[in-house]
Amino acid sequence: MIKLKQKKKRPPLIRLGIGIAVLGMVSTWWYVQRQTAATEHPETALFRALQEPRVDLAGAFRSYDAEARVAAQLRAAGLQFRSAILQRPPSSDYPPRTMVMLTVADYQHLGHGGTMVLEFFNDRLMEADFRPDDPSRYAARLHRQYPGLKRGRTGHAEWKAPPLRLWSTVDLARSKVGRTLGSEGVVLWQDLRLIQQRDDWDARFGHIPVPAPD
């Protein structure tokens, strides 16, 4: 007859210690979850949400892409950039507001060099801002690429295909008035959903004081 080995029973004190340790871990997890929920504004998820469809920005980027994804894309293209961040401290009084800008020097768009600035709102690409080194030469290429971009009376050009907005001052910058005023040529590609959400945040929560540090 084969005798089955009986599992040794843990002494009562060891079982009690294990039980206390497990209970402690569960309690800690529950406390952290409660504290996190208590410090989050009810609209936190809304101000971090992703939406489809995403729109093309400057022919190389997509709105709502995360900073890490875009940074990896730039590095893969051999481009160097610097980053800047402006962040509100977490608070239950308002949803998150984190603005990040990636500035890429010597960026090429439509065959012309310039500076590209990519702006993120709560880790979602919101805007691409291109500043050509030579607005006069770049303007013609830009209008061929976007024939719907029409110059208005103020010298600014705008074209909308919601949720995409394209806005430019390159025509003004190359004009006699623009050169006299020293106007800078700028082209903006924006996802209006994120622009409107940022503006909504500023209108509703911008007046709330920043919490004092602990």
Image (cartoon, rainbow, N blue to C red):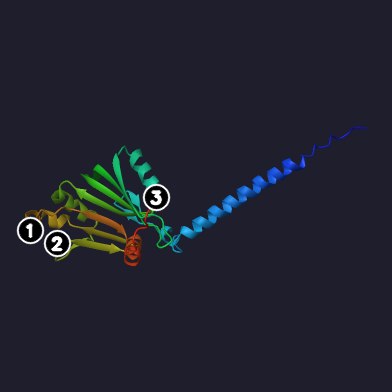
Inspect the image, locate mark 2, and give the three-letter code of the amino acid beneath it. Answer: Gly
Q: Position of residue 171 (x, y in %)?
A: 15, 57
At 19% from the left and 48% from the top, the residue drawn is: 132
Disc nearer the start of the sequence (2/1) = 2
Crowding near the residue tagged with mark 2, few <14, some 14–19, many ≥20 C-alpha atoms within 10 Å: some
Q: Position of residue 99 (x, y in %)?
A: 33, 53
Badge 2 element = loop
Can I make out residue 52 in this image?
no
Q: Quadrant of the N terminus?
A: top right
Disc nearer the start of the sequence (1/3) = 3
Q: Is residue 195 above or below residue 110?
A: below
Q: Are marks 3 and 2 in contact (CB under 8 Å)?
A: no
Inspect the image, locate mark 1, and give the three-letter code of the amino acid beneath it. Answer: Val
Q: Please give the label number shown on residue 66.
A: 3
| Residue at the right extreme of this rendering | 1
Residue identified by numbered label 1: 177
Q: Please give the label number shown on residue 155.
A: 2
